[in-house]
Image: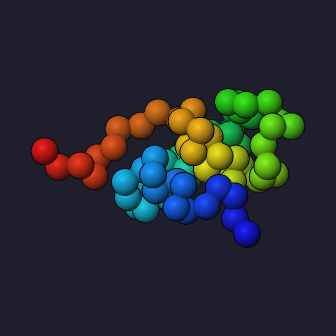
Amino acid sequence: MLYPSIDKLLNVVDSKYILVHVSSQRSKQMLENRHFQMKEKEYVNKKELGRALEEIEKGLVKFNNLSKNT
């Protein structure tokens, strides 16, 4: 079972495509800089991609939601 679930993440992000883009960018930042938004023991996931998704779910990653056309 994946954590966090896609249903919870889509409450934060409107599009699966934006979710993929933002999570991949954040996980690359984690790999390059070793900078995390939370303490390492607070993460459920061990890998950077899962940790990026956890940060997105908790609202720690800020991004422009481009899927909304006004």
Query: Which is more toward the observer, 52 or 8?
Result: 8
Where does residue 44 sit, x and y in percent of width and height?
A: 79, 49
Q: How many labels does the image show?
A: 0
Give x and y (percent) for residue 39. Answer: 80, 30
Q: Which residue is drawn at 28% across and 52% down?
A: 67
The residue that appears at 69% across and 54% down in the rendered structure is: 50
- Percent from the top left, x then y, of residue 64? 35, 38
Which image quarter is the N terminus in?
bottom right
In the image: residue 35, left or right of residue 53: right
**Snapshot quadrant of residue 43:** top right
Q: In this view, does 23 lie above or below 37?
A: below
Q: Which of 38 and 7 is in front in this view?
A: 7
Whether residue 7 is visible, yes or no, is yes
Direction left: furthest residue? 70
Q: Is residue 28 visible?
A: no
Which residue is found at the position 52% from the left and 61% from the top? Answer: 7
Residue at 38 percent of width and 58 percent of height: 15
Side of 31 where 40 appears, left or right: right
Quadrant position of residue 42: top right
Task: Judge left or right: residue 53 versus residue 11.
Answer: right
